Amino acid sequence: MNETLLSMQQLVKSSGVDAWVMYDFRGTNSLAWKMLNLKPNAHCTRRWVVVIPAHSAPFKIVHQMERIPLSHVEIEERIYATAAEYEQQLTNGLRGFTRVAMEYSPMNQIPVASKVDAGTIEFIRSIGLTVESSADLSQSFTAVLTDSQIERNELTAKQLRGVVIDAFEFVRTALLADTLVTEYDVQQHILSEFDALGLITESSPIVAIGPNAASPHYAPSKDETSRIEKDMVLLIDAWAREGDAADAVYADITWMGYTGAEVPSDVAEAFHVMASGRNAGLNLVKQRFLAGEPVFGFEVDDACRAKIVSAGRGADFIHRTGHNITTELHGPGVNMDNFETHDTRRILPGTSFSIEPGLYITGGIGMRTEIDVVIKNDGTVCVPTAPMQETVMPLLADEWKQ
């Protein structure tokens, strides 16, 4: 049994369940594929199951036609052909267990951890077992980063911040020269900078003036873009990772500018409210890790949101506080969320996530501040995208950079 499976078994023992049951049909369980290192193009058209008991040897149940995709998982193999044989193998394999963990979330509270269909859960329950969520188990193997990934991500984060600040400089130069500049122009400028640095992105960055930024996921295109003029709020949200490494981790930030010499008081105050929420969430994480105490995703959302609600702006904050980040921009680990979902997963050492409160007024303006937080494997909390933005940048002022 390899090191990963041994680690999984140790985690199963400490969790108190009798076994971890990983089930997949035609790639529906992306978490299991990642944890068991199946090839992305593996030919899987039949059901398979990998069972990791707490106190006995792991085994796999595979169809006789499709033994190859899991051949690299060197544990006992149990073969089936018919539906009846499949059910019998599963029933026999789980006999004697009472509680098992699966990629399932009660009431679908954590959708990213819910990968097993209701019918399979019904079958497991029909043979007398209680099914619990593997959400905390799985994130240990899908969201935890290596020291090398964390170290390289620090460079990516600095490069990304430099590109974003340069994009604001690009806008400033155009406005001072009375040159036409659009959201799309700025977006394409950012993408060209990514190319020069060897960075890649999952999708094109968000560049949005006030009214457009009121839609959090607005992004310009060649055919749909707005001109950036003076005295406008300007939001830039960009994300990228190394382009030459499959295990490279994303950095993801949002900064705000104002295309004038002085930031209006209402804009400055709105940013202050967001930054207070952002800092409250970050401080909670720092305090808990310093004290060696657990901190959960929903608690970070609560800490951030409480500041914004107390300032009377709660209705304008219409999304979760943050998301997990891995080699995927929106990773499978814990989200900072007690709004869209109730994420009860514990934030683990070796993980990365965003804190990004925003305020959005339909027909008015939209604003957001976003940082990345990385918990190093020794428990140190850092912000690789630092320094954090503290005030909106007045792009046409003599001293506009922070």
Image: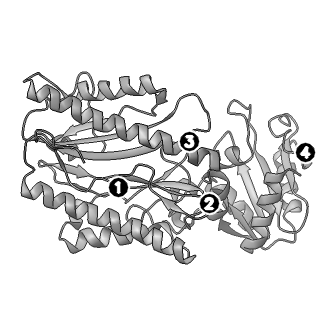
The residue lying at 52 percent from left, 69 percent from top is: 344
The residue lying at 78 percent from left, 59 percent from top is: 7
Name which of mark 1 and mark 2 comes first in the sequence: 2
Q: CA distance from mark 4 to mark 1?
A: 48 Å
Which numbered disc, 1 or 2, marks the residue closer to the eye? Answer: 1
Q: CA distance from mark 1 to mark 2?
A: 27 Å
The residue lying at 9 percent from left, 33 percent from top is: 229
Residue carrying label 2: 104
Name which of mark 2 and mark 4 comes first in the sequence: 4
Q: Amino acid type of disc 3?
A: Arg
Residue 378 is situated, as x and y percent measured from the top left of the image, at 62, 63
Residue 185 is situated, as x and y percent measured from the top left of the image, at 24, 24
Q: CA distance from mark 2 to mark 4?
A: 25 Å
Q: Amino acid type of disc 1?
A: Glu
> Callout 1: few (<14), some (14-19), or many (20+) C-alpha neighbours within 10 Å?
many
Name which of mark 4 and mark 3 comes first in the sequence: 4
Q: CA distance from mark 4 to mark 3?
A: 43 Å
Residue carrying label 1: 356
Judged from the image, the secondary structure of the residue bearing numbered disc 2 is: loop
> Callout 2: few (<14), some (14-19), or many (20+) C-alpha neighbours within 10 Å?
many
Name which of mark 3 and mark 1 comes first in the sequence: 3
Q: Amino acid type of disc 4?
A: Ile
Residue carrying label 4: 79
Q: Quadrant of residue 157?
A: top left
Judged from the image, the secondary structure of the residue bearing numbered disc 3 is: helix
- Residue in the foreground of this view, choosing between 328 and 150: 150
> Callout 4: few (<14), some (14-19), or many (20+) C-alpha neighbours within 10 Å?
some
